Image (cartoon, rainbow, N blue to C red):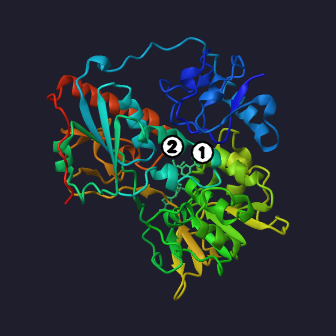
Amino acid sequence: MAFAITQNCCNDASCLSVCPVNCIHPTPDEPDFGKTELLYIDPRSCIDCGACADACPVDAITRVSRLTGDQAIYADINADYYRDRPSVAEWGAPKFPPASINSMPRFDVAIVGTGPAACYAAQALLRVPSSRITFYDRLAVPGGLARFGVAPDHVGTRRIGEHFRSVFVHPRVTMKLGVDIGTDITHDDLGRRFDAVVYGTGADNDRPLDIPGIDLPGSLSARTLVGWYTGHPDVSADAIDLSDVRRVTIIGNGNVALDAARILTADPADLVGTDISPHALAALRGSAVTEVVVAARRGPEFAAFTRSEAQALVNRRGVDVAVSGPAEALSAIDELPISAPGSALQGVASVDDAVPGTARRVVFSFGRAPVRLNGSPRVDSVEFSDGTTAESDLVLLAIGYRGTPSPGMPFNEVLGAIRNVDGRVVAEDGEPMARRYVVGWAKRGATGGIGDNKVDAEETVDALLQDIAANPPEPKKRLSRLRTR
Ligand code: NAP
Protein backbone atom coordinates (compact mmCIF):
# COMPACT_ATOMS: atom_id res chain seq x y z
CA MET A 1 0.00 0.00 0.00
CA ALA A 2 1.55 3.29 -1.12
CA PHE A 3 1.80 6.71 0.48
CA ALA A 4 0.07 9.75 -1.01
CA ILE A 5 0.73 13.48 -0.90
CA THR A 6 -2.19 15.57 0.32
CA GLN A 7 -3.50 19.12 0.58
CA ASN A 8 -0.70 20.65 2.65
CA CYS A 9 2.03 19.87 0.07
CA CYS A 10 4.38 22.84 0.00
CA ASN A 11 6.24 21.67 -3.12
CA ASP A 12 9.65 22.23 -1.58
CA ALA A 13 10.77 18.76 -2.72
CA SER A 14 12.29 17.73 0.62
CA CYS A 15 10.57 14.36 0.08
CA LEU A 16 12.24 13.76 -3.28
CA SER A 17 15.74 13.68 -1.95
CA VAL A 18 14.97 10.89 0.54
CA CYS A 19 12.89 8.64 -1.74
CA PRO A 20 14.96 5.51 -2.46
CA VAL A 21 13.02 4.54 -5.61
CA ASN A 22 12.45 7.91 -7.32
CA CYS A 23 8.67 7.56 -7.17
CA ILE A 24 7.84 11.21 -6.39
CA HIS A 25 7.36 13.57 -9.31
CA PRO A 26 7.69 16.04 -10.85
CA THR A 27 11.31 16.43 -9.78
CA PRO A 28 13.03 19.81 -10.09
CA ASP A 29 14.65 18.53 -13.32
CA GLU A 30 11.31 17.78 -14.96
CA PRO A 31 9.38 20.37 -16.99
CA ASP A 32 6.25 20.12 -14.83
CA PHE A 33 8.08 21.09 -11.65
CA GLY A 34 6.65 24.30 -10.19
CA LYS A 35 3.57 24.03 -12.42
CA THR A 36 1.68 21.32 -10.57
CA GLU A 37 -0.34 21.94 -7.47
CA LEU A 38 1.26 19.11 -5.50
CA LEU A 39 4.05 16.62 -5.89
CA TYR A 40 2.66 13.14 -6.50
CA ILE A 41 3.67 9.65 -5.37
CA ASP A 42 3.51 6.94 -8.03
CA PRO A 43 1.52 4.12 -6.38
CA ARG A 44 3.01 1.64 -8.88
CA SER A 45 6.56 2.09 -7.64
CA CYS A 46 6.19 3.35 -4.04
CA ILE A 47 7.74 0.74 -1.73
CA ASP A 48 5.92 2.01 1.35
CA CYS A 49 9.08 2.93 3.27
CA GLY A 50 7.68 6.19 4.66
CA ALA A 51 10.94 8.13 4.32
CA CYS A 52 9.10 10.91 2.47
CA ALA A 53 6.54 11.27 5.26
CA ASP A 54 9.36 11.73 7.79
CA ALA A 55 11.08 14.34 5.61
CA CYS A 56 7.98 16.38 4.77
CA PRO A 57 8.20 19.70 6.66
CA VAL A 58 4.42 20.25 6.60
CA ASP A 59 3.04 16.76 7.39
CA ALA A 60 1.44 16.40 3.96
CA ILE A 61 2.30 12.74 3.30
CA THR A 62 0.13 9.91 4.56
CA ARG A 63 -0.19 6.18 4.02
CA VAL A 64 -3.07 5.64 1.56
CA SER A 65 -4.77 3.22 3.93
CA ARG A 66 -5.04 6.05 6.47
CA LEU A 67 -6.67 8.49 4.06
CA THR A 68 -10.23 8.63 5.24
CA GLY A 69 -13.20 10.91 4.63
CA ASP A 70 -12.30 14.15 2.83
CA GLN A 71 -8.71 13.05 2.40
CA ALA A 72 -9.50 9.82 0.51
CA ILE A 73 -9.55 11.64 -2.83
CA TYR A 74 -5.79 12.24 -2.62
CA ALA A 75 -5.13 8.55 -3.42
CA ASP A 76 -6.86 9.14 -6.78
CA ILE A 77 -5.23 12.52 -7.30
CA ASN A 78 -1.75 11.04 -6.81
CA ALA A 79 -2.52 8.04 -9.05
CA ASP A 80 -4.14 10.26 -11.70
CA TYR A 81 -0.88 12.15 -12.27
CA TYR A 82 0.68 8.88 -13.48
CA ARG A 83 -2.26 7.74 -15.60
CA ASP A 84 -0.49 8.46 -18.90
CA ARG A 85 3.06 8.55 -17.61
CA PRO A 86 5.57 5.71 -17.54
CA SER A 87 7.00 4.58 -14.23
CA VAL A 88 10.34 6.39 -13.83
CA ALA A 89 12.74 4.37 -11.74
CA GLU A 90 16.06 5.59 -13.09
CA TRP A 91 17.75 8.63 -11.62
CA GLY A 92 18.84 11.75 -13.45
CA ALA A 93 22.52 12.66 -13.63
CA PRO A 94 23.93 13.65 -10.23
CA LYS A 95 24.23 17.38 -9.55
CA PHE A 96 27.32 18.84 -7.97
CA PRO A 97 27.70 22.21 -6.28
CA PRO A 98 28.74 24.93 -8.73
CA ALA A 99 31.96 25.57 -6.83
CA SER A 100 34.23 23.51 -4.66
CA ILE A 101 32.46 24.44 -1.47
CA ASN A 102 35.01 23.03 0.95
CA SER A 103 37.86 25.17 -0.34
CA MET A 104 36.03 28.49 -0.57
CA PRO A 105 37.40 31.35 1.52
CA ARG A 106 35.21 32.88 4.20
CA PHE A 107 32.49 35.06 2.71
CA ASP A 108 29.79 37.13 4.37
CA VAL A 109 26.29 37.38 2.96
CA ALA A 110 23.52 39.76 4.01
CA ILE A 111 20.03 38.37 3.46
CA VAL A 112 17.32 41.01 3.44
CA GLY A 113 14.06 39.49 4.64
CA THR A 114 13.38 36.49 6.87
CA GLY A 115 10.52 34.80 5.02
CA PRO A 116 10.53 31.40 3.29
CA ALA A 117 12.59 32.44 0.24
CA ALA A 118 15.20 34.09 2.45
CA CYS A 119 15.36 31.01 4.68
CA TYR A 120 15.75 28.58 1.77
CA ALA A 121 18.58 30.79 0.47
CA ALA A 122 20.24 30.66 3.91
CA GLN A 123 19.89 26.86 4.05
CA ALA A 124 21.61 26.57 0.67
CA LEU A 125 24.38 28.98 1.71
CA LEU A 126 24.96 27.25 5.04
CA ARG A 127 26.00 24.10 3.16
CA VAL A 128 29.21 25.99 2.42
CA PRO A 129 31.28 25.77 5.63
CA SER A 130 32.99 29.16 5.13
CA SER A 131 29.75 31.15 4.70
CA ARG A 132 28.49 33.63 7.30
CA ILE A 133 25.01 35.10 7.10
CA THR A 134 23.44 38.22 8.55
CA PHE A 135 19.67 38.45 8.22
CA TYR A 136 18.01 41.88 8.13
CA ASP A 137 14.29 42.38 8.60
CA ARG A 138 12.39 45.63 9.01
CA LEU A 139 10.08 43.91 11.50
CA ALA A 140 11.11 43.05 15.03
CA VAL A 141 10.08 39.42 14.55
CA PRO A 142 11.37 37.09 11.83
CA GLY A 143 9.37 34.76 9.61
CA GLY A 144 7.87 36.91 6.84
CA LEU A 145 4.92 35.22 5.16
CA ALA A 146 5.52 31.93 7.02
CA ARG A 147 4.39 33.89 10.06
CA PHE A 148 2.23 36.69 8.67
CA GLY A 149 0.86 35.08 5.50
CA VAL A 150 -0.07 31.45 6.13
CA ALA A 151 -3.61 31.27 7.47
CA PRO A 152 -3.82 30.28 11.14
CA ASP A 153 -6.05 27.28 10.44
CA HIS A 154 -3.38 25.84 8.12
CA VAL A 155 -1.63 24.39 11.12
CA GLY A 156 0.43 21.88 9.10
CA THR A 157 1.75 24.55 6.73
CA ARG A 158 2.58 26.89 9.60
CA ARG A 159 4.88 24.14 10.89
CA ILE A 160 7.33 25.26 8.20
CA GLY A 161 8.07 28.16 10.56
CA GLU A 162 9.57 25.71 13.07
CA HIS A 163 11.68 24.26 10.28
CA PHE A 164 13.06 27.74 9.50
CA ARG A 165 13.68 28.64 13.15
CA SER A 166 16.71 26.34 13.10
CA VAL A 167 18.23 28.66 10.49
CA PHE A 168 17.82 31.75 12.68
CA VAL A 169 19.71 30.15 15.58
CA HIS A 170 22.46 28.60 13.46
CA PRO A 171 25.93 29.47 14.86
CA ARG A 172 26.98 31.10 11.57
CA VAL A 173 23.88 33.29 11.41
CA THR A 174 23.39 36.77 12.91
CA MET A 175 19.95 38.37 13.18
CA LYS A 176 19.45 42.14 12.76
CA LEU A 177 15.76 42.83 13.27
CA GLY A 178 13.95 46.17 13.09
CA VAL A 179 16.29 47.46 10.36
CA ASP A 180 14.77 48.67 7.08
CA ILE A 181 17.25 48.25 4.23
CA GLY A 182 16.85 51.07 1.73
CA THR A 183 15.79 53.43 4.54
CA ASP A 184 17.95 52.83 7.64
CA ILE A 185 20.86 51.50 5.60
CA THR A 186 21.27 52.21 1.89
CA HIS A 187 21.59 49.37 -0.59
CA ASP A 188 25.01 50.69 -1.56
CA ASP A 189 26.27 50.73 2.04
CA LEU A 190 25.05 47.20 2.59
CA GLY A 191 26.62 46.06 -0.68
CA ARG A 192 29.96 47.62 0.27
CA ARG A 193 30.02 45.87 3.65
CA PHE A 194 29.12 42.34 2.53
CA ASP A 195 30.57 40.02 -0.08
CA ALA A 196 27.03 39.46 -1.36
CA VAL A 197 23.52 40.67 -0.59
CA VAL A 198 20.47 38.48 -1.24
CA TYR A 199 17.10 40.24 -1.36
CA GLY A 200 14.16 38.12 -0.23
CA THR A 201 11.86 41.04 0.34
CA GLY A 202 8.68 39.55 -1.14
CA ALA A 203 5.88 41.63 -2.64
CA ASP A 204 4.72 44.32 -0.25
CA ASN A 205 1.99 45.94 -2.34
CA ASP A 206 -1.24 45.08 -4.18
CA ARG A 207 -1.88 44.86 -7.89
CA PRO A 208 -3.91 47.99 -8.58
CA LEU A 209 -7.58 47.88 -9.58
CA ASP A 210 -8.50 51.19 -11.12
CA ILE A 211 -12.30 51.27 -10.95
CA PRO A 212 -14.61 53.95 -9.51
CA GLY A 213 -15.26 53.55 -5.79
CA ILE A 214 -12.24 51.35 -5.09
CA ASP A 215 -11.10 53.74 -2.31
CA LEU A 216 -14.45 53.84 -0.50
CA PRO A 217 -14.41 52.94 3.19
CA GLY A 218 -15.27 49.25 3.45
CA SER A 219 -13.13 48.39 0.42
CA LEU A 220 -9.87 46.84 1.61
CA SER A 221 -6.99 44.82 0.36
CA ALA A 222 -7.11 41.15 1.34
CA ARG A 223 -3.56 41.84 2.55
CA THR A 224 -5.09 43.91 5.36
CA LEU A 225 -7.35 41.04 6.38
CA VAL A 226 -4.45 38.57 6.29
CA GLY A 227 -2.25 40.90 8.36
CA TRP A 228 -5.13 41.43 10.78
CA TYR A 229 -5.80 37.76 11.45
CA THR A 230 -2.10 36.84 11.62
CA GLY A 231 -1.27 39.74 13.95
CA HIS A 232 1.05 41.63 11.59
CA PRO A 233 2.52 44.60 13.48
CA ASP A 234 1.55 47.02 10.65
CA VAL A 235 -2.18 46.20 10.87
CA SER A 236 -4.07 47.60 13.81
CA ALA A 237 -6.40 45.44 15.87
CA ASP A 238 -9.41 47.57 14.87
CA ALA A 239 -8.62 47.58 11.14
CA ILE A 240 -11.62 45.31 10.53
CA ASP A 241 -14.99 45.38 12.24
CA LEU A 242 -17.28 42.49 11.30
CA SER A 243 -20.13 43.29 13.67
CA ASP A 244 -22.22 44.97 10.91
CA VAL A 245 -20.88 43.06 7.93
CA ARG A 246 -23.35 40.52 6.57
CA ARG A 247 -22.05 39.96 3.08
CA VAL A 248 -18.44 40.14 1.89
CA THR A 249 -17.43 40.17 -1.78
CA ILE A 250 -13.89 39.11 -2.56
CA ILE A 251 -12.55 40.14 -5.97
CA GLY A 252 -10.26 37.47 -7.43
CA ASN A 253 -10.28 33.73 -6.79
CA GLY A 254 -6.66 32.85 -5.98
CA ASN A 255 -5.66 31.12 -2.78
CA VAL A 256 -5.49 34.43 -0.90
CA ALA A 257 -9.20 34.89 -1.70
CA LEU A 258 -9.95 31.36 -0.48
CA ASP A 259 -7.96 31.87 2.73
CA ALA A 260 -10.01 35.02 3.37
CA ALA A 261 -13.32 33.29 2.58
CA ARG A 262 -12.48 30.36 4.84
CA ILE A 263 -11.44 32.47 7.83
CA LEU A 264 -14.43 34.82 7.49
CA THR A 265 -16.85 31.88 7.58
CA ALA A 266 -14.96 29.75 10.11
CA ASP A 267 -16.46 28.60 13.35
CA PRO A 268 -14.39 30.62 15.87
CA ALA A 269 -14.26 27.54 18.11
CA ASP A 270 -12.18 25.82 15.43
CA LEU A 271 -9.62 28.63 15.55
CA VAL A 272 -9.04 28.50 19.29
CA GLY A 273 -5.52 27.25 19.94
CA THR A 274 -4.24 28.31 16.50
CA ASP A 275 -1.95 31.29 15.84
CA ILE A 276 -4.87 33.59 15.00
CA SER A 277 -4.52 37.05 16.54
CA PRO A 278 -6.66 37.52 19.68
CA HIS A 279 -8.39 40.58 18.16
CA ALA A 280 -9.39 38.63 15.02
CA LEU A 281 -10.73 35.75 17.09
CA ALA A 282 -12.79 38.16 19.20
CA ALA A 283 -14.13 39.90 16.07
CA LEU A 284 -15.06 36.58 14.45
CA ARG A 285 -16.99 35.65 17.58
CA GLY A 286 -19.08 38.80 17.15
CA SER A 287 -19.21 38.60 13.34
CA ALA A 288 -22.47 39.12 11.44
CA VAL A 289 -21.08 37.61 8.23
CA THR A 290 -23.46 35.15 6.60
CA GLU A 291 -22.18 35.06 3.03
CA VAL A 292 -18.86 35.48 1.25
CA VAL A 293 -18.88 35.79 -2.54
CA VAL A 294 -15.62 34.92 -4.30
CA ALA A 295 -15.95 36.75 -7.62
CA ALA A 296 -13.77 35.73 -10.59
CA ARG A 297 -13.72 37.66 -13.83
CA ARG A 298 -13.20 34.50 -15.90
CA GLY A 299 -14.75 31.03 -16.03
CA PRO A 300 -14.00 27.99 -13.85
CA GLU A 301 -11.45 26.64 -16.34
CA PHE A 302 -9.25 29.62 -15.37
CA ALA A 303 -9.68 29.33 -11.61
CA ALA A 304 -6.61 30.72 -9.84
CA PHE A 305 -7.16 28.74 -6.63
CA THR A 306 -5.60 25.32 -6.20
CA ARG A 307 -7.80 22.25 -6.26
CA SER A 308 -6.88 21.23 -2.76
CA GLU A 309 -7.83 24.60 -1.24
CA ALA A 310 -11.20 24.65 -3.01
CA GLN A 311 -11.81 21.01 -2.09
CA ALA A 312 -11.17 21.79 1.57
CA LEU A 313 -13.79 24.56 1.46
CA VAL A 314 -16.33 22.30 -0.25
CA ASN A 315 -15.73 19.52 2.27
CA ARG A 316 -15.96 21.74 5.34
CA ARG A 317 -18.91 20.94 7.54
CA GLY A 318 -21.20 23.71 8.77
CA VAL A 319 -20.60 26.07 5.83
CA ASP A 320 -22.59 25.80 2.59
CA VAL A 321 -20.87 26.25 -0.75
CA ALA A 322 -22.63 27.29 -3.97
CA VAL A 323 -21.64 28.44 -7.45
CA SER A 324 -23.06 31.27 -9.52
CA GLY A 325 -22.51 32.84 -12.93
CA PRO A 326 -23.61 32.46 -16.54
CA ALA A 327 -25.03 29.03 -17.47
CA GLU A 328 -22.11 28.21 -19.78
CA ALA A 329 -19.63 28.87 -16.96
CA LEU A 330 -21.51 26.61 -14.58
CA SER A 331 -21.83 23.80 -17.11
CA ALA A 332 -18.09 24.09 -17.84
CA ILE A 333 -17.38 22.99 -14.27
CA ASP A 334 -18.69 19.49 -15.01
CA GLU A 335 -16.40 19.13 -18.01
CA LEU A 336 -13.19 19.80 -16.11
CA PRO A 337 -10.67 16.97 -15.59
CA ILE A 338 -9.77 15.97 -12.01
CA SER A 339 -6.41 17.75 -12.40
CA ALA A 340 -8.15 21.12 -13.00
CA PRO A 341 -8.62 23.20 -9.82
CA GLY A 342 -12.22 24.07 -10.76
CA SER A 343 -13.17 20.38 -10.72
CA ALA A 344 -13.31 20.63 -6.95
CA LEU A 345 -16.65 22.40 -7.50
CA GLN A 346 -18.24 19.50 -9.39
CA GLY A 347 -21.51 18.58 -7.72
CA VAL A 348 -21.79 21.92 -5.91
CA ALA A 349 -25.28 23.41 -6.33
CA SER A 350 -25.81 26.69 -8.14
CA VAL A 351 -27.10 29.59 -6.07
CA ASP A 352 -30.52 29.28 -7.73
CA ASP A 353 -30.85 25.61 -6.82
CA ALA A 354 -29.14 25.71 -3.47
CA VAL A 355 -31.41 24.77 -0.61
CA PRO A 356 -30.97 27.50 1.98
CA GLY A 357 -29.00 25.98 4.82
CA THR A 358 -28.75 27.04 8.40
CA ALA A 359 -25.13 27.86 7.96
CA ARG A 360 -22.94 30.53 6.46
CA ARG A 361 -22.31 30.28 2.77
CA VAL A 362 -19.39 30.74 0.38
CA VAL A 363 -20.41 31.42 -3.23
CA PHE A 364 -17.92 30.85 -6.07
CA SER A 365 -19.01 33.32 -8.71
CA PHE A 366 -17.63 33.19 -12.28
CA GLY A 367 -17.56 35.51 -15.29
CA ARG A 368 -17.91 38.62 -13.15
CA ALA A 369 -15.36 41.39 -13.70
CA PRO A 370 -15.88 44.29 -11.28
CA VAL A 371 -16.56 47.66 -12.91
CA ARG A 372 -17.54 49.88 -9.97
CA LEU A 373 -18.01 49.93 -6.21
CA ASN A 374 -21.07 51.87 -5.03
CA GLY A 375 -22.04 53.38 -1.70
CA SER A 376 -21.87 56.51 0.40
CA PRO A 377 -20.16 57.01 2.72
CA ARG A 378 -19.26 53.27 2.79
CA VAL A 379 -19.29 50.69 0.07
CA ASP A 380 -22.61 48.88 -0.22
CA SER A 381 -22.39 47.03 -3.55
CA VAL A 382 -20.16 45.85 -6.36
CA GLU A 383 -21.25 46.21 -9.98
CA PHE A 384 -19.99 43.65 -12.48
CA SER A 385 -19.43 43.72 -16.23
CA ASP A 386 -22.37 41.38 -16.87
CA GLY A 387 -24.74 43.94 -15.34
CA THR A 388 -25.20 42.06 -12.08
CA THR A 389 -24.69 43.70 -8.70
CA ALA A 390 -23.67 42.11 -5.41
CA GLU A 391 -24.75 43.93 -2.27
CA SER A 392 -21.70 43.94 -0.04
CA ASP A 393 -20.84 45.48 3.31
CA LEU A 394 -17.16 44.69 2.85
CA VAL A 395 -15.18 44.30 -0.38
CA LEU A 396 -11.80 42.62 -0.34
CA LEU A 397 -9.39 43.00 -3.20
CA ALA A 398 -7.51 39.74 -3.70
CA ILE A 399 -6.16 40.20 -7.22
CA GLY A 400 -2.53 39.51 -6.41
CA TYR A 401 0.49 41.27 -5.01
CA ARG A 402 3.49 43.13 -6.41
CA GLY A 403 6.64 44.67 -5.00
CA THR A 404 7.37 48.37 -4.53
CA PRO A 405 10.37 49.92 -6.29
CA SER A 406 13.10 50.88 -3.82
CA PRO A 407 15.44 53.78 -4.69
CA GLY A 408 18.71 52.35 -5.94
CA MET A 409 17.25 48.96 -6.89
CA PRO A 410 16.35 48.20 -10.52
CA PHE A 411 12.70 47.25 -10.88
CA ASN A 412 10.76 45.18 -13.40
CA GLU A 413 7.39 46.95 -13.71
CA VAL A 414 5.75 44.02 -15.49
CA LEU A 415 6.55 41.47 -12.80
CA GLY A 416 6.38 43.95 -9.93
CA ALA A 417 9.72 42.53 -8.79
CA ILE A 418 13.44 43.37 -8.66
CA ARG A 419 14.98 43.27 -12.14
CA ASN A 420 17.13 40.15 -12.40
CA VAL A 421 18.34 37.34 -14.60
CA ASP A 422 18.19 33.95 -12.86
CA GLY A 423 18.62 35.63 -9.48
CA ARG A 424 21.42 38.07 -10.34
CA VAL A 425 20.14 41.64 -9.99
CA VAL A 426 20.66 43.47 -13.29
CA ALA A 427 20.75 47.20 -13.97
CA GLU A 428 18.58 48.91 -16.60
CA ASP A 429 21.27 48.16 -19.22
CA GLY A 430 20.96 44.42 -18.46
CA GLU A 431 24.39 44.20 -16.82
CA PRO A 432 24.56 42.28 -13.50
CA MET A 433 25.03 44.52 -10.45
CA ALA A 434 28.02 43.27 -8.49
CA ARG A 435 27.19 41.17 -5.42
CA ARG A 436 23.39 41.68 -5.55
CA TYR A 437 21.02 38.74 -5.78
CA VAL A 438 17.32 38.14 -5.33
CA VAL A 439 15.04 35.23 -4.36
CA GLY A 440 11.33 34.43 -4.03
CA TRP A 441 8.49 36.78 -4.94
CA ALA A 442 10.97 39.67 -5.15
CA LYS A 443 12.66 37.70 -7.98
CA ARG A 444 9.82 36.14 -9.98
CA GLY A 445 6.76 38.17 -8.96
CA ALA A 446 4.06 37.12 -6.50
CA THR A 447 3.37 33.59 -7.69
CA GLY A 448 3.82 30.24 -6.02
CA GLY A 449 3.53 28.85 -2.54
CA ILE A 450 6.16 28.41 0.13
CA GLY A 451 7.99 25.38 -1.25
CA ASP A 452 8.34 26.88 -4.72
CA ASN A 453 10.92 29.16 -3.17
CA LYS A 454 13.36 26.34 -2.45
CA VAL A 455 14.46 25.52 -5.99
CA ASP A 456 14.22 29.22 -6.84
CA ALA A 457 16.57 30.11 -3.94
CA GLU A 458 18.99 27.32 -4.86
CA GLU A 459 19.25 28.71 -8.39
CA THR A 460 20.19 32.12 -6.99
CA VAL A 461 22.66 30.68 -4.49
CA ASP A 462 24.32 28.65 -7.28
CA ALA A 463 24.87 31.92 -9.18
CA LEU A 464 26.20 33.60 -6.04
CA LEU A 465 28.66 30.75 -5.35
CA GLN A 466 29.90 30.78 -8.93
CA ASP A 467 30.58 34.52 -8.63
CA ILE A 468 32.33 34.13 -5.26
CA ALA A 469 34.47 31.27 -6.63
CA ALA A 470 35.37 33.34 -9.70
CA ASN A 471 36.17 36.42 -7.67
CA PRO A 472 37.05 35.37 -4.08
CA PRO A 473 36.78 38.06 -1.40
CA GLU A 474 39.83 39.35 0.46
CA PRO A 475 40.50 37.47 3.72
CA LYS A 476 39.04 39.34 6.69
CA LYS A 477 39.01 38.78 10.41
CA ARG A 478 35.56 40.18 11.09
CA LEU A 479 32.99 42.52 9.61
CA SER A 480 33.27 46.18 10.46
CA ARG A 481 30.19 47.71 12.08
CA LEU A 482 27.48 49.06 9.84
CA ARG A 483 25.75 52.10 11.28
CA THR A 484 22.12 52.81 10.54
CA ARG A 485 21.14 56.25 9.27
P1 NAP B 1 -3.32 34.92 -7.75
O1 NAP B 1 -3.23 33.47 -7.51
O2 NAP B 1 -2.47 35.52 -8.80
O3 NAP B 1 -4.87 35.24 -8.05
C1 NAP B 1 -5.26 36.53 -8.44
C2 NAP B 1 -6.73 36.53 -8.78
O4 NAP B 1 -7.10 37.89 -9.04
C3 NAP B 1 -7.10 35.74 -10.02
O5 NAP B 1 -8.37 35.19 -9.86
C4 NAP B 1 -7.13 36.82 -11.10
O6 NAP B 1 -7.98 36.54 -12.17
C5 NAP B 1 -7.72 37.97 -10.32
N1 NAP B 1 -7.45 39.26 -10.94
C6 NAP B 1 -6.26 39.79 -11.29
N2 NAP B 1 -6.43 41.01 -11.81
C7 NAP B 1 -7.76 41.25 -11.78
C8 NAP B 1 -8.56 42.34 -12.16
N3 NAP B 1 -8.03 43.44 -12.69
N4 NAP B 1 -9.90 42.26 -11.97
C9 NAP B 1 -10.46 41.15 -11.44
N5 NAP B 1 -9.75 40.08 -11.05
C10 NAP B 1 -8.41 40.14 -11.21
O7 NAP B 1 -2.98 35.76 -6.44
P2 NAP B 1 -3.09 35.44 -4.88
O8 NAP B 1 -4.38 34.81 -4.53
O9 NAP B 1 -2.72 36.72 -4.24
O10 NAP B 1 -1.94 34.38 -4.62
C11 NAP B 1 -0.55 34.68 -4.88
C12 NAP B 1 0.26 33.39 -4.81
O11 NAP B 1 0.31 32.92 -3.46
C13 NAP B 1 -0.37 32.26 -5.62
O12 NAP B 1 0.64 31.52 -6.26
C14 NAP B 1 -1.06 31.44 -4.57
O13 NAP B 1 -1.25 30.08 -4.93
C15 NAP B 1 -0.10 31.59 -3.39
N6 NAP B 1 -0.82 31.32 -2.13
C16 NAP B 1 -0.97 30.04 -1.76
C17 NAP B 1 -1.70 29.75 -0.63
C18 NAP B 1 -1.92 28.33 -0.23
O14 NAP B 1 -1.28 27.43 -0.78
N7 NAP B 1 -2.83 28.05 0.66
C19 NAP B 1 -2.27 30.76 0.14
C20 NAP B 1 -2.11 32.07 -0.28
C21 NAP B 1 -1.39 32.35 -1.43
P3 NAP B 1 -7.41 36.13 -13.61
O15 NAP B 1 -6.98 34.70 -13.48
O16 NAP B 1 -8.57 36.32 -14.50
O17 NAP B 1 -6.25 37.05 -13.90
Spot the residue most to the bottom: 377
For residue 275, which quarter of the picture?
Answer: bottom right
Q: Quadrant of the N terminus?
A: top right
The residue that appears at 81% across and 29% down in the rendered structure is 65
Residue 411: image location, x then y, percent: 27, 51
Mark 1: amino acid: Thr
The reply, left or right, for residue 404 in relation to residue 57 is: left
Residue beneath label 1, please?
157
Location of residue 371 with respect to 227 vertically, above or below: below
Kindly tell me whether mark 2's CB lies below 8 Å from ligand 1. yes
Vertical position of residue 294 compared to residue 80: above or below: below
Circle 1 or circle 2, nearest the eye: 1
Cβ–Cβ below 8 Å for labels 1 and 2? Answer: yes
Farthest residue, direction left: 474
Residue 365 seen in the current view:
no
**Mark 1 or 2, nearer chain start:** 1
- Left or right: 442, with 229 as reference point: left
Give the vertical position of 485 relative to 448 (above or below): below
Q: Where does label 2 land, which residue? A: 450
Q: Which image quarter: residue 124? A: top left
- Give the amino acid at mark 2: Ile
